[in-house]
Amino acid sequence: MIQVGPFGAALTLDATSFDLTTQQVPTAINFRLLRAHAIVAWAFFKYQLVVGLGVQGVTMSFGTSSVPLLSPPSGVGPEAGMLLKLDDQPWRLGVSARAPVSGGVSSDGSPSGYILPSAVVSPAQIQIGFALQLGPRPLNPRWIDPSDEIEPLREKIDVARSERAKADALALGAIPAGPARESKRRELDATERAIRRVEEARLAAEEKTIRAELDARFTNWPRPRLLVVADAVITAPVDNAVPISGFLNQQVDGYGKSWTISPRFGLEGEPFVDRFKLRVGSYLEPSLFDGGAARQHFTFGGDLKLFEWNFFGVLAKTMWQLSFATDFAPRYTNWGLSIGVWR
């Protein structure tokens, strides 16, 4: 991910590989999925509105250690999104949409005798999310660009340089061409270089002061708050879809024929101010099988403030955190740990 002013770009790759077995297929079949997102975005109205456009690519394959069952089908599709975060407001609104991605199977058959699907499809999705922050800590503080703050001083220095250049030109014009004029030019150039060194030092000191003030503004914000987030993932149906288990069992199950909605809800707070953040939430995982029951998930996680470290001198002194996350549901458990920067 890279950001330069209001422009941003990101490339993410998500690779998954796992083995599947059934009573009908005692030999493990390896399932591999690679998904990529390439996105560019631009911020408008002083970063109050961010709009992004990109493409999603998917490639998938089945196989055993000795027999490839499916040649890798691949496809790409467009995606877009926006984030609205008005200055000094305690809420944010985000919307994203992904077009379906479909990749056809190029092989005509398989020595394994499997009936192969004709294509692999990632369905279209729409996601709508909303965040509301309660408490004294601001969610959308007005962005103050250090370049804007120092611009008046830059303009003042530019005007002074222009006036000095005109005065120097008049002074040189009053001297006839010859050694005296060249001597005067060298004198004026040396004086100008000395003045510019002072001006550059003044600019650097002013910029350092401005950045220190902005850092203090961020540091002195009150920390207590309760962040409430909610969103919904809406997934479109796919015609003639067969789940992976149906492919392995070589039977057609009713799957993915209807629109589904996965609502999600979460809370984040700081029970131990400036030391520990806590998150709890829940979401509904809809069943894609005909007549299937949805599954409720419960999640929680947190961030623990650790210590300052400059990463062997590579970075400035940075406060680090240890994060954890868990996700529980019937017949399902997921957990993770990560190291990041404390904010």
Image: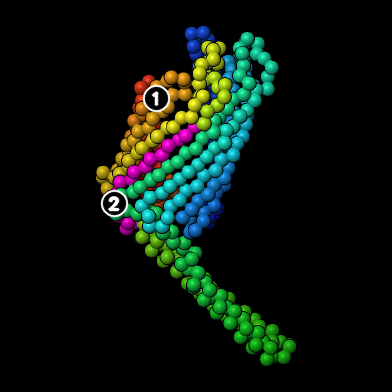
Protein image colouring: rainbow
Give how far across and how far down residue 78 sits, in percent.
59, 39
Nearer the observer, 208 or 105: 105
Identify the magenta region: 219-235
184 or 255: nearer the eye?
255
- Looking at the image, residue 50 sits to the left or right of residue 297; the answer is right
Local crowd size for mark 1, using a 10 Å CA cut-off: few (<14), some (14–19), many (≥20): few
Residue 163 x %, y %: 58, 82
Give the x, y percent position of residue 228. Answer: 34, 43
Three-letter amino acid code at the position of disc 2: Gly
**Mark 1 belongs to which amino acid?**
Ala
Tag 1, which secondary structure?
Answer: loop
Which residue is under mark 2?
A: 135
Q: Residue at x 39, y 54 (%)?
A: 140
The answer to whether 138 is drawn above or below residue 16 in the figure is: below
State the residue in front, 106 or 239: 239
* Residue 304 seen in the figure: no
- The residue at 51%/8% (across/down) is 24
Report the residue marked by disc 1. Answer: 294
* SS at mark 2 in the image: loop
